[in-house]
Image: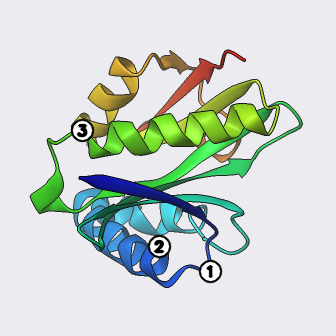
Amino acid sequence: MIKLIRTDSTNADFIALVQKLDADLKEKDGNEHTFYAQYNKIDNIKNVVIAYSNSTPVGCGAVKHFNDQIMEVKRMFVEIPHRGNGIAGIILDELEKWTVELFYLKCILETGQKQVEAIRLYQKKGYSITPNYGQYIGIENSICFEKHLKF
């Protein structure tokens, strides 16, 4: 059974999961990793969700203020042995619920072309491809998504 907790980026389990995420991304992104890493700092993220299986942290995600109407989904990760069980979708659902509770209207996110599982997840969850935003404008490896949320 998966249990979710809401916390922030100071949570030790979140920090440990993000370290595993960064190692995974460094391998997948290769030379482009340094560019992306500068935008994936976890300092001062107030809205973090961690998934636990039998009290073991197995996945995480966060939303971060982008502007007065939009939250940006960040740091989505599920441990390899736990992938394919719907955990990422459960985390994303909770992040969206929290976003609505905070009166934001939309979630946006960026992922890499090589993150095929992530792309499938976001499309399955109703996210639409949108023009690259912010620091991702002109970055060919980046795919940006958005989803308008319902209150």
Is residue 132 left or right of 118 when viewed as pictured?
Answer: right
Q: Quadrant of residue 81?
A: bottom left
Q: Which mark is residue 10?
A: 1
Between residue 12 and residue 143, name the one nearer to us. 12
Q: Which amino acid type corresponds to the residue marked 3 in the rendered image?
A: Gly
Q: Quadrant of residue 66?
A: top right
Disc 1 to disc 2, how far (Cα)?
A: 8 Å
Percent x, y of residue 149: 65, 19
Percent x, y of residue 104: 79, 31
Is residue 101 left or right of 78 when viewed as pictured?
Answer: right
| Residue that appears at 40% across and 64% down | 33
Q: Which amino acid type corresponds to the residue marked 1 in the rendered image?
A: Thr
Looking at the image, is 71 positioned above or below residue 79?
Answer: above
Q: Which amino acid type corresponds to the residue marked 2 in the rendered image?
A: Phe
Answer yes or no: is residue 138 visible.
Answer: no
Between residue 121 and residue 101, name the one nearer to us. 101
The residue that label 2 is drawn on is 14
Is residue 20 left or right of 39 when viewed as pictured?
Answer: left
Give the mark nearest the N terminus, 1 or 3: 1
Between residue 60 and residue 118, name the one nearer to us. 60
Looking at the image, is 87 positioned above or below residue 128?
Answer: below
Give the mark nearest the N terminus, 3 or 2: 2
Q: How many marks?
A: 3
Residues marked 3 and 2 touching at CB (< 8 Å): no
Answer yes or no: is residue 151 visible.
Answer: yes
Q: Which mark is residue 86?
A: 3
Residues marked 1 and 2 touching at CB (< 8 Å): yes
Percent x, y of residue 57: 32, 70
Identity of the residue furthest to the bottom in this view: 12
Disc 3 to disc 2, how far (Cα)?
A: 19 Å
> Which quadrant would the C terminus be assigned to in this image?
top right
| Residue that appears at 30% across and 73% down | 55
